[in-house]
Amino acid sequence: MDYTSSGEDMGKNVGDDLAEGKPTLPLIHAMQHGEVHESEMIREAIEKGNGLDKIDAIMATMERVAR
């Protein structure tokens, strides 16, 4: 829910967990089912805490693998 809900709905900003380097279940799912380069991008974003720089690409990956 962190990535598809609005900040008002959740009481926090969208992507906060990613920015803090927290591997949430949607991120783990995207890493397991995404292309190699997508998995590496997400892993790096979590490890370095720079996920907000790549939030659009990460969200696109999560949406694609959720289908």
Image: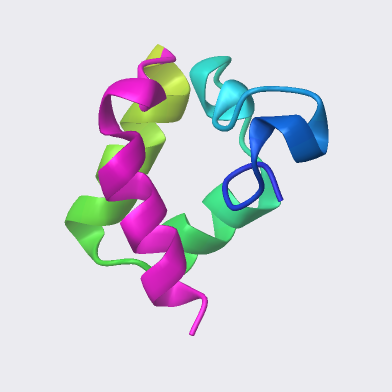
Comparing 40 with 15, the one in front is 15
Residue furthest to the bottom = 67
1 to the left or right of 52: right
- Image point (30%, 43%), residue name: 56
Number of marks drawn: 0
**Magenta stretch encompasses residue 19:** no
67 relative to 60, above or below = below
51 to the left or right of 13: left
12 relative to 48, above or below = below
- Image point (71%, 51%), residue name: 1
Quarter of the image where one finds residue 31:
bottom left
- Image point (38%, 23%), residue name: 52
**Magenta stretch encompasses residue 50:** yes
13 relative to 3, above or below = above
Q: Residue 22 in the image: x percent, y percent?
A: 63, 26
Q: Residue 12 in the image: x percent, y percent?
A: 73, 22
What secondary structure characterizes most of the magenta part?
Answer: helix
Q: Residue 20 in the image: x percent, y percent?
A: 58, 15
Residue furthest to the front = 8
Q: Which residues are magenta?
A: 49-67
Q: Residue 51 in the image: x percent, y percent?
A: 38, 26
Comparing 48 with 58, the one in front is 58
50 to the left or right of 21: left
